[in-house]
Image (cartoon, grey):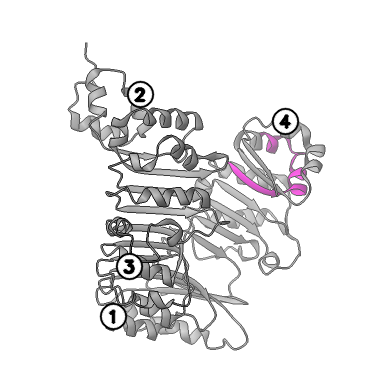
Amino acid sequence: MYTKFELLPNEIVIECFQYLTAADIFYSFDQLTYHLHTLIRSILLHINFQNIQKSIFDGFCHRIAINPEIKSQIISLQLANKDACEQIQAFLSLVPLNELVHLRSLILINLNADIAKQIKIMLSFLTNLSCFSYTDDTRFGLGIDDMLPVPQQYVDSMSIIQAMSLTSIMISRCDANELCHLFKYAPMLRYLKIKQFFSSDLREETMRLCDVSAVHLKHFIMEYCGLDFKALAEFLKLMPNLTNLIISGTNDTKGPFNADDWKSLIITSLLYLHTFKFKWDIKLNNQNKDILDIFQQYQTDFWLNKHSWFTNYEIHTESAIIYTIPYTSDHYNLIPIENKHANPTIHTSGIFNNAKNLTLVIDALKNDYPYYFPTVESITLMNKYTFYGERIYRLFGFQHIEYMKAIVNLSNLTHLCILRGIQIESSAIMLQMLRGAPQLSSMKIDAPLLILFLDDAELCKYLNEKIKNLNIYSDPASMLIRKARWFIVSVKTITKIVND
């Protein structure tokens, strides 16, 4: 007897599978009927092991390891070393990457140096790989040369062939030398994202590579650029067909944010650029009196009318920022502003849709703040003295929570950090915040502040039900346990407690 699901056309069943993880597909449908068993083995598998239970991860990895047919189906794979689960090491111990012969996309998160050496060897055998992305554990600082099989001496033909197949690369960091190597050995590159791009003196052997243009490169993203404008311009000239450029950096007033310099570069060398998004954080000193004039260079016809590249700028006590609209970074510092300028023709409602992580200086909270943050997932609360490195406490009261709720949508909030220097006026404020943040499951908090909350039974109940990851800093953990032992024991939902 057939079920209604089995009577559906294969095309519809396969489309339904797209909403499930690979593990769910195999565990739910593989043994139901011979038809589904056969159909599952005809589809291409996109495996993303992020946010999966460890027991399911372990079981599915063993299933892949003993089944060559499943290995041949995998075309994309995402692994993450997070918390106590070292997925990358665990997977590779069972399934070497070179056995995934049809793998096209590989994403590795929080990679460490030891595993990077294994990955580098295996990448040479993945001849179908076109997209490679990694972020490294910040302790190791892995660059392109540590990950990709791009040779320092230009004799390794297997490495050259491998690199040439890549069309999309996302990496944690690289310098000028590494980027020159990459352009030489990945001439088909169309998309490049670098989290941190550093300046470096070009080595003599690298200079010979810098005349190689990345003619196929269309999208170039630098989440942090440490180059001055002259050096940056030389690299951008190697990308004559670039259509999308996104760049951020922190500089003094000699940094690469002069509007006239960019205008000249775009007119002469970046003829096809239609999307240009940037954010420059600038450190100010007593000689920066002309910063306002520099920012207003972006209000000319070339920027506003010809390209519709609109900007906001903010000038603070010791820093300034200018950014294109909408704000492109996922992190925003909401601090007291002395001078803010926005283009009056632009609606402000969607400017900060990309800002997922918000550092909120409570001194900036007021009832006439002009912007709204609809998609924030992480909030760090601090006062302005902490932001500028001073040790002074400020009170976070009922008025602050009302102002915050007016400018931040708390429904997506998953992590809350309350830095030292914040005193919560009442546990009722914390309770109000928890009620307004249904997704909140992670918290970092000063031990004495947490202890004060434990006198409120209703707040303790909410903490018990909601918080799964608790990071406690300041006082020794023994003090917290001594004063609130009953709370720690009773919180059955907490899976991780960290003491900084």
Mark 2 touching mark 4, by CB under 8 A? no
The x and y percentages for residue 230 are 42, 83
**Residue beneath label 1, please?**
269
Circle 3 packing at 10 Å, graded few (<14), some (14-19), many (20+), is many
Q: How many marks?
A: 4
> Which residue is situated farthest in the left direction here?
9
Quadrant of the drawing holding the N terminus:
top left
Tell me which residue sits at (49%, 28%) in the image.
Answer: 55
Q: What residue do we see at 32% from left, 67% from top?
A: 183
Which image quadrant is residue 402 in? bottom right
217 left or right of 312?
left
Going from N to C along the chain, the mark reached first, 3 or 4, is 3
- Residue at (28, 66) in percent of width and height: 217
Three-letter code, disc 3:
Phe
Per the rendering, the mark at residue 489 is 4
Q: Is residue 112 visible?
A: no
Q: Earlier in the sequence, mark 2 or mark 4?
A: 2
CB atoms of marks 2 and 3 within 8 Å: no
Q: Is residue 71 above or below residue 211?
A: above
In this rendered view, identify the residue nearer to me: 19 or 163. Answer: 163
State left or right for residue 202 relative to residue 431.
left
Residue position for label 2: 28
Residue where numbered disc 3 is placed: 183
Residue type at tag 1: Ser
In this rendering, the answer to whether 491 lies above or below 469 is above
Real-space Cα separation, disc 3 to disc 1, in angstroms: 18 Å
- Residue 358: percent from left, percent from top: 55, 58
Three-letter amino acid code of the residue under disc 4: Val
